[in-house]
Amino acid sequence: MSTLNVRVWRGTEAGAYQEFEVPRLESQTVLDVVTYIQRTLDPSLAYRFACRVGMCGSCAMTVNGRSRWTCRTHVDKVADGARLEIAPLRNLPVVRDLVTDMAPFFDKWARARGRFRGAATRKEDFARVSPSSTQRRHADAGIECIGCAVCYSGCDVVSWNPDYLGPAALNRAWTLVNDVRDVENRERIRAVAGDAGCHACHTHMTCTERCPKQISPTAAISGLKRAAALAALRGDLDRD
Amino acid sequence: MNNDWRARNHPAYWAFVVHRASGVLLTLFLPLHFWALGQALTGEEKLESFLRWSDQPLVKIAEVALVLLLAAHMTGGLRLLALEFLAWRDWHKSLLSVAAGIALAAGLLFLLNLY
Amino acid sequence: MSAERGNVRIQVLLWTAQRATAALLAVCVLVHLVTIIYAVRNGLSAAEILGRTRGSAGWAAFYGLFVVAVAVHAPIGLRNILGESLRWRGAGVDAVMAALALALVAGGLRAVYAVVT
């Protein structure tokens, strides 16, 4: 029976890797490995998971340097020989071991006005939105985001600029900018523009590379850049 | 905790590095360029003597490098303008190879014309 | 953060100016590269360069525009780099970048003047 040599991050930001030997099994996922360690070798290991079938995004971690969903990552695909290195997501405070504090991620989501604001009431008719319209296609390209923070974890601009809203928040804002029912887009564009917003993106495209839902936050952010430039030239950014 | 090279090792990231590095190096070069051309203020002779000084092989190599940097920064920049201003398309991924190819061609042309 | 918010419009205009000058510079650089590659054939001499540029309103206009566009484009890019690599942000770096822009205009237009007169 072959074994995997697994290094797992223990502690907070100040911490160290701890090594474990884990039996290697067929079709094993990285989440299986982490679960084995916690149940059999060291119960004090802290980690998150929920659905374990690639729907919730809770199990996102950094595996051999790349952020990904561990339940959807087969060991055979990523093991460097028989070695694995498992760490928490980057760019987020570490609560303990493999668990990060997601609050900053969702705070930025809110700062980007990543929530819908409509003006219709139950007395009005349904909004008629054609699925093939350009705006709806742009929105549809990004609405499958489940907020797993894999993109945020991989983004170097987030590392270099603590105020940067990040790919997920900006992607969500773009889906709402393209929602014809939303009435807050003037404020939303002001919220996502500038050095802490879409203009800080340098198209490294790590977010697009790593998104498990194949969303391209880079495309969304490019859209926001165009929208913000238009808004600036129209005078919509003049007053806060 | 920050990302290391394993997270960054993909084409669009290297395109960013080339673009940023070339931009910085070109900006550092500009004052020298302006000074050299400014030598012509007092007449042809000073510019001519600078150009003769630049005839040595090491300087020529540096000039090839500069042409490559300039071409790379331009083609990389055009790629960025396409990514940011044109509606997203899948062929955008191959923009990178096109940009790199044109930049290398420019450098090669310069080198060939030097001799 | 509130200081950031207040300057969003200026930040967006800086970005727009950098992209606009980028488009203009793409043309300028293309012309410049073609000129360079043509000029270095059979060796480069001051007489050859100046013979082309002296008294030429066309070259004066072209290089003058080139200089101004670079003076806008480069400092804005450098501002991002300084903020991200050295964490140098705020009024200080903005002032230094503005000074750099002026220095590039001054040095560049002096060089243009030197070769067209």
Image (cartoon, coloured by chain):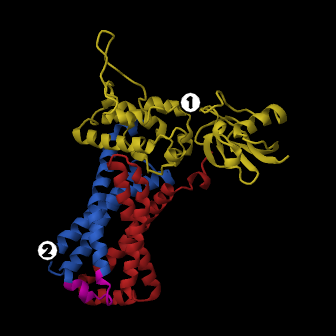
Residue B22 coordinates in the image, percent (x, y): 43, 65
Q: Colour of chain B?
A: red
Question: Which subunit holds the residue at mark 1?
Answer: A
Q: Is residue C42 left or right of residue A99?
A: left
Instruction: Say few, some or many: other residues with alpha carbon within 10 Å of mark 1 (under 14 / 14 to 19 / 20 or more).
Output: few
Residue B4 coordinates in the image, percent (x, y): 61, 53
Helix, strand or loop at label 1? It is helix
Task: Report the magenta residues as a range.
Answer: C38-51
From this viewpoint, is residue C77 visible?
A: yes
* Res. A103 mark: 1
Please tell me whether residue A199 is drawn above or below residue A119 in the rendered image: below
Residue A189 coordinates in the image, percent (x, y): 34, 35
Q: CA distance from mark 1 to mark 2?
A: 61 Å
Instruction: Say few, some or many: other residues with alpha carbon within 10 Å of mark 2 (under 14 / 14 to 19 / 20 or more).
Output: few
Q: Colour of chain C?
A: blue
From this viewpoint, is residue A163 visible?
A: no
